[in-house]
Image: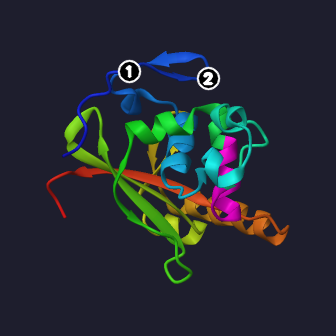
Amino acid sequence: APPGPISAVVNINGNAIADGFWESASTFTKLIVTATVANRARFAAEEDTGAPEEAQMFKTKEAKILGDASDTGILRHCDKVIDSALVRGIFPPIYEIPFNSVNKWSAAVVGNPANGAEHITFMKGAPERILDRCTHYLHNDKEMPMDDEYKAKYMSSYETFGSMGERVLSFAFKKVDAGKN
């Protein structure tokens, strides 16, 4: 069963956010949460690494992360913004689809802690694959419908960064009825 409402206060960039924070979260916060949840990397336990307990507990640069290069880098960055263990505790996966080279995306379905009748699907993957599955985008904390002009700018940006040798990933989320398959 999906978890009940969030009972703890979450601190994101110094802002205290309580029950139902997802609905009122900023675009940046939703990106960081999505990148954290749709991520299979994890901080290694002390017994996995031999690193001092403090390195793991406070996630210093000595703390080892287990996972592929992209997920490791994303997790290390996101964890500087908000505690990844806290985010994953709020949004534990109900179902996951790991990344593979055919699909070029991964997904995690979680319960919506503010609404037990909903799930949230978080996705990460190749920009063209994520774009194909989206009808809206977030800009300045507002949901905007995707039109051809936006899609062209999106693809142009993606291609520009890709041509410079940069790895480009896209992130998406969608709230769905928990009763639907």
Report the residue marked by disc 1.
8
Find the distance from the CA under tag 2 to the CA under tag 1.
16 Å
The foreground one among 180 and 36 is 36
User: In the orientation shown, which residue stands out farthest toward the right?
Assistant: 164
Q: What element carries label 2?
A: loop
Q: In which quarter of the image is residue 122?
A: bottom left
Which amino acid type is marked by label 2? Asn
In the rendered structure, are the residues bearing label 2 and label 1 in contact, judged by CB atoms less than 8 Å apart?
Answer: no
Q: What element carries label 1?
A: loop
- Asked whether residue 51 appears in the rendered view, the answer is yes
Does residue 76 belong to the magenta stretch? yes
The structure residue drawn at horizontal position 71% and vertical position 63%, both measured from the top left corner, is 69
In the rendered image, which quarter contains the C terminus? bottom left
Q: In this view, does 17 lie to the left or right of 159?
A: left
Image x and y of residue 175, in percent: 31, 48
The structure residue drawn at horizontal position 58% and vertical position 59%, both measured from the top left corner, is 170
- Asked whether residue 139 appears in the rendered view, the answer is no
Q: Is the magenta stretch mostly helix, strand or loop?
A: helix
Q: Which mark is residue 13?
A: 2
The structure residue drawn at horizontal position 20% and vertical position 39%, both measured from the top left corner, is 116
Does residue 143 belong to the magenta stretch? no
Other-residue count near label 1 (Cα within 10 Å), few / some / many at <14 / 14–19 / ≥20:
few
In the image, residue 166 above or below residue 2: below
Q: Which mark is residue 74?
A: none
The structure residue drawn at horizontal position 67% and vertical position 31%, both measured from the top left corner, is 58
The foreground one among 64 and 156 is 64
The foreground one among 63 and 127 is 63
Which amino acid type is marked by label 1? Ala
Q: In this view, does 92 lie to the left or right of 150?
A: left
- Whichever of callouts 2 and 1 sits on the residue coming sooner in the sequence is 1
Other-residue count near label 2 (Cα within 10 Å), few / some / many at <14 / 14–19 / ≥20:
few
For the record, the magenta segment spans 66-77
